[in-house]
């Protein structure tokens, strides 16, 4: 199985070319763009209903995922996230799981397991939601964000990221949600809360966040009259 | 002066500001994406309470944040809220006029003040307002566009739709006017208000109009409670 990233970075799309029958790729519901017609598509709740419901309710992912199975060599599959933005692929080798914020997961090899992790009460106020999605196993993992994806290697000195811009990070990084600046900053800075990462690993952040776009559009909604 | 690199251009641009020890950058509230742990952020209203109030009425956020690298070099990542390109303007003796929502960040020596006067009335309804950036020393201002950024040269006269303005050299004279011969014709043309420039200087425009975009998307959304 080979994959190619197309139309990066603004409108990234993944093209997968299968080398042999039986090869599979798991993709979030509705992310498929195109596929060879002989390819089989199976819709399922990966990990069973409970795990799927947990992912949906807690991890912000769809209940259903589609598994595409190649029937012959050379078949292709295209998939893309809903919002405009970038997609990153990581070849997981089984040693370092990846933590993703709500909605960042796009797809991956069937050998990758997904689990919803409690982000801790500290995650309660964070834009990333209370829960994180943990991907572990081997094979390619695809995740996406609204906007550009900026990666930072976190060293012993750590790194600070606005909570609404956290996309993913390597498991093993410690993080704390905290405010920046003094108490005045909490209400007036417009910065809300930040994640302070510590340890050795990699952090991916988005250069835009969808809530800012929503906040911009909100005043343009028509106003409902009471009568 | 901090080194400023702009990446991910043009659609999802991100400004990476590299600060030497004790160097500072001021940024629009909410612009911070990430930063080193030794960067200290402080919220302050520069120019005192009156200066802050003046800015608040200008539609610009009342508070800007000052980022300072402490005990060593550090970086700050900054981005505007909407999609689009960003660029760094090097300060000139005459300075710049900047449409308030285009302002992203500036070096500490740059004075950023709200312009009052005739322009205000025309723009206030749209939440758009004009800032003037000046500096006696070398300095930089980071501006952001909704969509792409283009530099136009004004050689005498130029007319620009107010919704597409980002910034311009303060050497230029400007006035806000209806676009057509009469108010009705202007309204029907959909062009609304335009800015008429006179003189010699550069003007930076954005290829999309945020107000038009808001109306296009907002009108498709369910009504909100009034």
Image: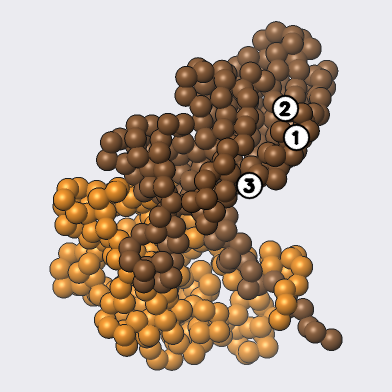
Chain colours: A brown, B orange
Residue A109: mark? none
- Residue at x-position 38% and y-position 42%: A197
Residue A83: mark? 3
- On the same chain, marks 3 and 1? The answer is yes
Camera-side residue of B125 and B192: B125
**Where is residue A106 drawn, in percent x and y?**
63, 34
- On the same chain, marks 1 and 2? The answer is yes
Residue A47: mark? 2
Residue farthest toward the front in the current orientation of the protein: A121
Q: Vertical placement of A125 versus A43: above or below?
A: below
Camera-side residue of B107 and B137: B107
- Residue at x-position 42% and y-position 81%: B56
Image mark 1: chain: A
Query: Between disc 2 and disc 3, whose residue precedes?
Result: 2
Q: Which of the image's four quarters has the N terminus of chain B?
A: bottom left
Which element is circle 3 on?
loop
Q: CA distance from mark 2 to mark 3?
A: 26 Å
Q: Look at mark 1 in the image and give the residue it sits on.
A: A50
Image mark 3: chain: A
Q: Vertical placement of A6 versus B81: above or below?
A: above
Q: Answer left or right for B199 relative to A209.
A: left
Marks 2 and 1: in contact by CB < 8 Å? yes
Which element is circle 2 on?
loop
Which element is circle 1 on?
helix
Query: Between disc 3 and disc 1, whose residue precedes?
Result: 1
- Residue at x-position 60% and y-position 83%: B180
- Residue at x-position 59% and y-position 71%: B211
- Location of residue A34 by image quarter: top right
Q: Nearer the viewer, mark 2 or mark 3?
A: 2
Q: Vertical placement of A214 versus B56: above or below?
A: above
Q: Which of the image's four quarters has the C terminus of chain B?
A: bottom right
**Where is residue A50 drawn, in percent x and y?**
75, 34
């Amino acid at each position: 199985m080979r994959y190619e990233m197309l139309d990066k970075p603004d409108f990234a799309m993944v093209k997968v070319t299968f080398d042999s029958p039986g090869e599979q790729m798991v993709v979030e519901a509705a992310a498929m763009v195109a596929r060879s017609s002989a390819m089989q598509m199976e819709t399922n709740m990966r990990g069973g209903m409970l795990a799927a419901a947990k992912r949906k309710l807690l991890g912000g992912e769809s209940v259903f995922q589609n598994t595409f199975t190649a029937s012959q060599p050379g078949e292709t599959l295209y998939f893309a996230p809903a919002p405009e933005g970038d997609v990153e692929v990581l070849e997981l080798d089984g040693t370092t799981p990846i933590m993703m914020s709500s909605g960042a997961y796009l797809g991956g090899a069937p050998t990758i397991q997904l689990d919803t992790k409690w982000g801790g009460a500290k995650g309660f106020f964070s834009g990333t939601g209370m829960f994180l999605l943990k991907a572990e196993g081997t094979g390619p993992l695809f995740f996406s964000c609204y906007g550009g994806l900026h990666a930072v290697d976190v060293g012993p000195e750590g790194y600070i990221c606005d909570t609404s811009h956290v996309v993913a990070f390597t498991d093993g990084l410690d993080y704390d949600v905290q405010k920046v600046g003094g108490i005045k900053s909490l209400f007036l800075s417009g910065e809300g809360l930040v994640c302070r990462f510590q340890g050795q690993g990699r952090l991916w952040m988005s250069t835009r966040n969808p809530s800012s776009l929503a906040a911009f559009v909100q005043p343009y909604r028509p106003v409902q009259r009471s009568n | 002066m901090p080194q400023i690199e702009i990446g991910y251009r043009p659609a999802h641009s991100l400004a990476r500001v590299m600060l030497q020890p004790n160097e500072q950058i001021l940024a629009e509230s909410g612009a911070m994406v990430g930063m080193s742990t030794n960067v200290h952020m402080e919220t302050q209203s520069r120019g005192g309470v009156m200066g802050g109030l003046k800015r608040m009425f200008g539609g610009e956020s009342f508070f800007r944040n000052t980022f300072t690298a402490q005990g060593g070099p550090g970086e700050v990542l900054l981005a505007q809220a909407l999609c689009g390109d960003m660029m760094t303007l090097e300060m000139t003796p005459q300075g710049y006029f900047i449409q308030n929502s285009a302002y992203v960040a500036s070096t500490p020596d740059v004075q950023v003040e709200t312009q009052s006067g005739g322009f205000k009335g025309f723009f206030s309804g749209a939440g758009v307002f004009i800032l003037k950036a000046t500096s006696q020393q070398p300095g930089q201002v980071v501006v952001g566009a909704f969509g792409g950024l283009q530099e136009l040269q004004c050689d005498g006269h130029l007319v620009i739709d107010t919704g597409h303005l980002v910034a311009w050299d303060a050497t230029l004279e400007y006035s806000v006017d209806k676009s057509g011969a009469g108010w009705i014709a202007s309204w029907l043309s959909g062009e609304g208000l335009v800015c008429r420039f006179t003189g010699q200087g550069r003007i930076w425009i954005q290829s999309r109009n945020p107000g038009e975009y808001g109306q296009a998307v907002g009108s498709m959304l369910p009504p909100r409670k009034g």
